[in-house]
Image: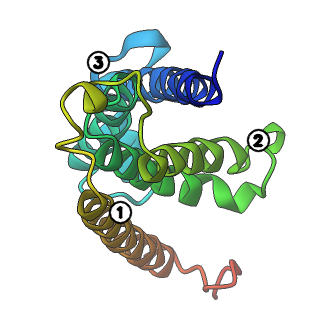
């Protein structure tokens, strides 16, 4: 087997694995599949985590994960798919960050890993065994990588800034200082 085919098979395996996991997590949020809670309950939970409005945040996260996962697995619009999934994972990382790095303690290790894999695939490209390759890479161009990555980073930054403000407002209303101490 030539080196080129080995790389293409490796990219296919990464796309299918990461895309499948991302799809499953998004489907939990959107449809309640695979033991998930569906859009309404996920929206309520996200509201509680500081993502407002909760239902819209759940929809965006679910679409970023499920849609990005399906597109990554197929190798279609790979730069946009990778960027969307990575952006969704940035929100998950922010939720898990207070627990530290390792997932065994509830940390951000797992969503960060999924985000990095998705971003890496979006930058690298899907390889030969993909819809992008079959269509002449019309949705897999260098400018798409730049635009999709920038748009995803900006959107994630805006969402995380809004979340931080919502959490700070909630803490202030509850009489908790920024360092976590209860104010008299």
Which type of secondary structure does the marked residue at label 3 adopt? helix
Residue 28 % position (x, y): 40, 22
Which residue in the structure is indicated by mark 3?
31
Q: Earlier in the sequence, mark 1 or mark 3?
A: 3
- Label 2 crowding class (10 Å Cα cut-off): few <14, some 14-19, many 20+? few
Residue 157, by quadrant, is: bottom left
Q: Earlier in the sequence, mark 2 or mark 1?
A: 2
Distance in Å between CA atoms under marks 2 and 3? 25 Å
**Residue at screen point 61% across, 26% down:** 10
Question: Residue 37 versus residue 160: which sits nearer the camera?
Answer: 160
Whether residue 96 is visible: yes
Assess whether mark 3 and mark 1 are in contact (beta carbons under 8 angstroms). no
In which quadrant of the rendered image does the C terminus lie?
A: bottom right
Which residue in the structure is indicated by mark 1?
149
Distance in Å between CA atoms under marks 2 and 1? 26 Å
Whether residue 39 is visible: no
Distance in Å between CA atoms under marks 1 and 3? 27 Å
Residue 132 % position (x, y): 27, 33
Which residue in the structure is indicated by mark 2?
103
**Residue at screen point 38% across, 68% down:** 153
Q: In the image, which is nearer the foreground, mark 2 or mark 1?
A: 1
Q: In this view, does 116 lie to the left or right of 26?
A: right
Residue 14 % position (x, y): 57, 28
**Residue at screen point 31% across, 67% down:** 146
- Label 1 crowding class (10 Å Cα cut-off): few <14, some 14-19, many 20+? many
Furthest residue in direction top, as rendered: 34
Task: Check the image and tell me how it is coloured.
Answer: rainbow
Q: In the image, which is nearer the foreground, mark 1 or mark 3?
A: 1
């Amino acid at each position: 087997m030539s080196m080129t085919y080995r790389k293409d098979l490796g990219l296919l395996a990464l796309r299918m694995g990461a895309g499948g996991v991302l799809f499953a997590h998004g489907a939990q949020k959107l449809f309640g599949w695979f033991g998930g809670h569906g859009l309404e309950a996920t929206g309520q939970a996200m509201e509680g985590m500081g993502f407002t409005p909760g239902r819209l945040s759940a929809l965006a996260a679910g679409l970023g994960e499920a849609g990005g996962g399906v597109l990554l697995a197929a190798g279609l619009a790979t730069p946009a798919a990778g960027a969307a999934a990575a952006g969704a994972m940035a929100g998950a990382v922010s939720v898990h960050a207070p627990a530290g790095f390792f997932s065994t303690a509830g940390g951000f290790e797992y969503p960060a890993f999924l985000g990095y894999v998705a971003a890496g695939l979006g930058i690298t490209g899907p390889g030969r065994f993909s819809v992008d390759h079959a269509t002449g890479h019309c949705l897999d161009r260098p400018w798409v990588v730049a635009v999709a990555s920038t748009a995803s980073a900006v959107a994630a930054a805006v969402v995380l800034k809004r979340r931080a403000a919502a959490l700070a407002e909630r803490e202030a209303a509850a009489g908790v200082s920024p360092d976590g101490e209860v104010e008299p």
